[in-house]
Image (tube, rainbow, N blue to C red):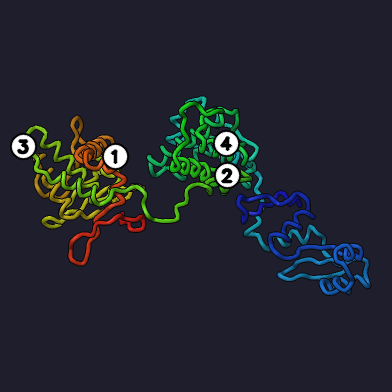
Amino acid sequence: MNPADWVDTATIPPRPLPPTVEAALAYLAEVLGHPVYAHWTLARVKRRYGSLAEAKAAQPAVLKLLLAHDAAVEYWERGRLRTVPAAQAPSPEAVLARVLHTHRRRFQRAAAPTATTLKATSAPAAPGPWLADQDARTLAWLARVGRFAQPQAATNTLGATDDAQALALFLRDRAARSAHTRRAYGAELRRLMAWCEARQLGPLSDLSRQHLLAYRHALQHGDDRGNTVAPGNRPLAEATRSRALAVVASCYRFWYNTGYLHANPAAGLSAGSRARAGFTPTRWLPPALMAACDAWCAIPVPDGADALVARRQRAIWALFRYAGVRLAELAWSAEAGLPRLEAETLGRWTLYVRGKGDKRRAIPLPAACVAIVRAYRLARGLPAEPPPHEALPLIHGNKGEALQAAGLYRELKTLLAAVAAGLADNDPAQALLLRKASPHWLRHYLPFPTMSGDTDERPRKSKDCRF
């Protein structure tokens, strides 16, 4: 038998057994945790143990047989270790075959490739949205195989034959459910590829640990695009560095776990980045600024041509402020008909949005938010209470049917800038903080109901998130 035809499927990645019978038996003894086959002579006993007393204590059965025979054999059979004279022992090949049969769920024989399997493994993986958008030069750079790639079909459970296919399968597995995740992953992968091209490295499956550590150093010192730091090229922010290293580490870990790589050079690559041990947010508006924005929205809106625009800004603020929605969740989707308002009873509204993973989420709105959105609806000429199954965009646009993510962001930033302008003379530091705020900051600050029915305003921690 050829031990290399057998694969240990319990390891990550799966690996073939050593090519010789002796090495395979030693490997099985190591991974199974008990002796499998050992051939003993008096000379080997002397080399192994320091004294006869030590040998007698460790191998009494072996020494007893060696007094009458030239050699003895220990071998594993049916869950126990047997010791017999060498002349009566089974061959090493027979012992190896028995142990492999006993553990047949773990050790499996690699099937010989057929015409069907060869056709399936040679077929290129679906490029996916991200790879389909790349130019021919980038695809040619990716369509290679490095020294850490594992071409054996028995151990390469991913089934990829080059980096382009492996990358397509990684993005399909980790980023297929969210266009935003796919875009973020793609940006970080392009960053790594640009760094490799500037130093004539690659492909990705050829990068060593030293290369990836040098890439991490480049991110920290701002030279991730070229060989030297250009004047004015500042180091990346800590959050950006953490995201970049996390994407790279995730890609290599996926390749290693699925058998495309026989080593993981990115193990622990992102361990030195910012730890997320706590739940306390670092970007949120203090209560004084939240109250200032609420007071600004409470100012009566004069009638005129800009009244609808002003009420729209206030409605956008109220939805971000009280519902804690993401920017993409408030953008209108005609296919899903979301976001959508639904009035259960008078004054009790629920906002339905499409969240991460295309999951439909229901968010109850407090009375303060309902009052502002109701005024905006009346200004649009809509009923004060949303009728059942209403299929209109929640926030209207100036040129199109609905205001999308970019327009929502712009309107909220305009409102924050207007409030900041009123604070600039008395408190310039708070005004600067308000100008830096974004819709995501408001997800860290939500009203919580109290026993009295009022609300308790406090910064929301991530573990308090209900959405």
Amino acid type assigned to the residue bearing label 3 in the image: Asp
In whole angstroms, how far apart are the C-alphas of marks 1 and 3?
31 Å
Instruction: Give the residue drawn at x 41%, y 42%.
Output: 181
Mark with earlier residue (2, 3): 2
Label 4, label 3: how far apart the Cα atoms are = 61 Å
- Relative to 28, is 317 on the left or the right? left
Label 4 or label 3, whichever lies nearer to me, is: 3
Relative height, residue 302 to residue 199 (above, below): below
Question: Callout 1, which amino acid?
Answer: Leu
Real-space Cα distance between discs 2 and 1?
39 Å
Residue 204's tag is 4
Q: Amino acid at mark 2?
A: Ala
For the residue pair 438 and 131, the one nearer the viewer reads as 438
Q: Which residue is mark 3?
A: 303
Circle 4 or circle 2, nearest the eye: 2
Number of other residues with Cα within 10 Å of mark 2, as a class: few under 14, some 14 to 19, many 20 or more: many
In front here: 120 or 222? Answer: 222
Residue occupying the point 52% across, 41% down: 248
Query: Real-space Cα distance between discs 4 and 2?
Result: 11 Å
Q: Position of residue 178 (x, y in %)?
A: 38, 43
The first of marks 2 and 1 along the sequence is: 2
Q: Residues within 10 Å of mark 3 (few under 14, many from 20)?
A: few
